[in-house]
Image: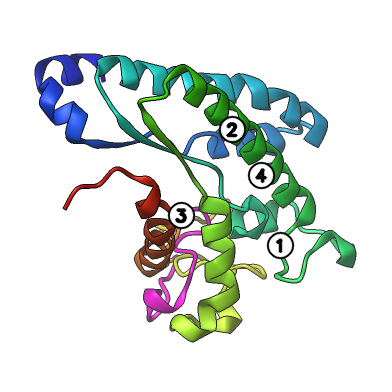
């Protein structure tokens, strides 16, 4: 990154550019949890990961960036990969959207820590526009309004590209493996492969985020 910014991008370009630093943390947390780490152990990882993100933001600022978006995490308890891995028969483990409460609460904990760190960083850089990207609430908005914007309400937490189980996701037969099918119309699904979202889902989330963040950016028409 440093060599690219120093050799390719002029200070004028950097000053007029919008930087997106993240989303970071989702893979680390899933790997830890899938390897048997408890929720408390995973929570103890949060400060270090948040500080790593903040360090990256500072580096970008040092190169000349003046407008930076730092996204938080999605409600991971709503994703097929997590719903499959941590499936339980305990009904009150799920919320009204059939997302796993503990995992979503963990995402909220991480996001709050990140927001606090961003607020502290703003004090050190009062002339820099630092914005928290609220992926969490953008995704929840989509989940709440999916039917009205063209998604199939019966497949909101099923992978389009996948096979097996309640969520059409099997860690041993992932999207791209032989004989793993793809749904007829990906635009009606939120989840593409159990981990990533479909293009249509990202499009609606982007709309929500743009509406939320545009007033906070120093954009000149």
Res. 62 in view: yes
Q: Which residue is mark 3?
A: 196
Q: Which is more foreground, mark 3 or mark 1?
A: 1
The numbered mark, 1 or 4, whose residue comes first in the sequence reads 1
Answer whether labels 1 and 4 touch (C-beta < 8 Å): no
Magenta segment includes 188: yes
Q: Which is more foreground, mark 4 or mark 2?
A: 2
SS state under label 2? helix
> CA gap, disc 4 to disc 2?
11 Å
Q: Which is more foreground, mark 1 or mark 2?
A: 2
The numbered mark, 4 or 3, whose residue comes first in the sequence reads 4
Q: Residue at x 19, y 48 (%)?
A: 220
The numbered mark, 2 or 3, whose residue comes first in the sequence reads 2
The numbered mark, 4 or 2, whose residue comes first in the sequence reads 4
Q: Residue at x 84, y 59 (%)?
A: 93
Q: Residue at x 42, y 57 (%)?
A: 209
Answer whether labels 4 and 2 touch (C-beta < 8 Å): no
Local crowd size for mark 1, using a 10 Å CA cut-off: few (<14), some (14–19), many (≥20): many
Does residue 133 appear to the left or right of 93 in the view shown?
A: left
Q: Of helix, strand and loop, which mostly describes the magenta segment?
A: loop
Res. 9 in view: no
Residue 170 image point, x, y percent: 59, 58
Residue 90 image point, x, y percent: 89, 62
SS state under label 3? loop
Q: Which residue is mark 4?
A: 107
Answer whether labels 1 and 2 touch (C-beta < 8 Å): no
> CA gap, disc 4 to disc 3?
16 Å
> CA gap, disc 3 to disc 1?
16 Å
Q: Residue at x 81, y 31 (%)?
A: 40
For the record, the magenta segment spans 180-196
Q: Which residue is mark 1?
A: 99
Q: Which residue is mark 2?
A: 114
């Amino acid at each position: 990154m440093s060599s690219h910014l120093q050799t390719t991008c002029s200070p004028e370009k950097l000053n007029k550019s919008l930087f997106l630093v993240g989303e970071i943390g989702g893979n680390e947390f899933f790997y830890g949890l899938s390897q048997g780490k408890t929720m408390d152990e995973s929570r103890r990882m949060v400060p270090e990961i948040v500080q790593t993100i903040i360090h990256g933001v500072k580096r970008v600022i040092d190169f000349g960036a003046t407008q930076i978006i730092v996204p938080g995490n999605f409600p991971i308890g709503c994703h097929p990969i997590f719903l499959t891995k941590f499936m339980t028969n305990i009904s009150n483990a799920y919320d009204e959207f059939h997302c796993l409460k503990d995992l979503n609460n963990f995402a909220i904990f991480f996001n709050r820590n990140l927001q606090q760190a961003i607020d502290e960083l703003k004090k050190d850089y009062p002339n820099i526009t630092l914005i928290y990207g609220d992926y969490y609430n953008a995704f929840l908005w989509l989940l709440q309004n999916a039917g009205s914007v063209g998604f199939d309400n019966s497949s909101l937490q099923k992978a389009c590209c996948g096979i097996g189980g309640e969520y059409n996701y099997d860690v041993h037969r992932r999207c791209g493996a032989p004989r793993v099918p793809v749904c007829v119309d990906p635009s009606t699904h939120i989840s593409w492969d159990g981990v990533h979202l479909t293009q249509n889902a990202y499009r609606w989330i982007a709309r929500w985020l743009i509406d939320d963040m545009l007033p906070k950016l120093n954009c000149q028409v």
